[in-house]
Each structure stands twice: as C-alpha cells, then as structure tokens.
Image (tube, rainbow, N blue to C red):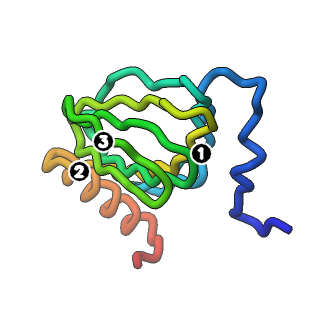
Amino acid sequence: MLQPGQLNIYSLRNPQVREAQLVRLFEGEEIHAYMLVVPPGGHIERHSHENKHEIFDVLEGSGVIEVAGRPVTSGPGRCAFVPAGVAHSLHNDGDAPWTLRITCQDRVYPRHLGKLIGALYESAWRGDEIG
C-alpha cells in the first residue's frame, strides 16, 4: 500500500498514451522533482532552461539523453546532469516505456539576493519566526 508522498510509477505506464507523461513529485523553494514516462519512440525536443539545473535518473527502460550535442545512452541506474542553460533532448529508442526521475534545482543569481533579503526583512517585520 502506498504511503503519503509516494507514487506508483507503474500507474503512469498507459500503453494507449503516445505522448510523454510528466507528473510533479514535489516542489520546494529551489528544488523540485518530476516523474517522466516516455513511450517507445517518444521524444522531448531539444531545449534549455536558463535558470535550472537538471538531473535525470533512469528508473527503467532505456533511451538517449542528448546533452550539448553529445548523446548519452541511459538505462536503469544511470543518470545525467544538465547544467542550467545547456541544450538537451530525450529520445526513447527502446520498445518499452522509459521512466526517469527529474530533479531540478533553480540556479540563484546575485540579483536574486536582493529579493531574498527583502523577503527576510519583511518576514522579520511581521514577527515571523526565522529558522
């Protein structure tokens, strides 16, 4: 039986679905994770995320993660890191669903510090407990 916060990845494997399925697992302030199931022959077009690092952990199946023009064949137990701003794509070249967990971390720029300091100041002004 599933406990709160758990997800049965097998429930996402719908043979009728021809598109990739993306399910949010959790979201924090700077880190979030998704479950991605790519059907056989399915793909995610080349793209990049300017402010987000991504780690792809392969849970089952196999496919190719292209990172900065370099193909990386990825099967169960393998992972790939995609730094913020780097173009990447995914392609399931196998005959079974390809299931990956994607962990994303927002890249913090110096300009974000002003927003963080402002939020901290506002919180302290309201009397919120910090820590």
Residue 24's mark? 1
Q: Residues within 10 Å of mark 1 (few under 14, many from 20)?
A: few
Please say if 122 is above or below 96: below
Q: Amino acid at mark 1?
A: Arg
Q: Which residue is mark 2?
A: 108
Q: Which residue lies most toward the front here?
A: 95
Q: Amino acid at mark 2?
A: Val
For discs 2 and 1, the disc positioned in front in the rendered view: 1
Pick the front one: 104 or 38: 38
Please say if 16 is above or below 117: above
Q: Position of residue 64 (x, y in %)?
A: 39, 36
Q: Residues within 10 Å of mark 2 (few under 14, many from 20)?
A: few
Residue at the spot 41% in from the left edge and 76% down from the top edge? 130
Image-based side of 99 in relation to 56, left or right: right
Q: Quadrant of the N terminus?
A: bottom right
**Circle nearer the N terminus (3, 1):** 1
**Circle nearer the N terminus (2, 1):** 1
Residue 72's mark? 3
**Circle nearer the N terminus (3, 2):** 3
Residue at the spot 24% in from the left edge and 41% down from the top edge? 84
Q: CA distance from mark 2 to mark 1?
A: 21 Å
Q: CA distance from mark 3 to mark 1?
A: 24 Å
Q: Amino acid at mark 3?
A: Val
For discs 3 and 1, the disc positioned in front in the rendered view: 3
Residue at the spot 30% in from the left edge and 32% down from the top edge? 88
Residue 46's mark? none
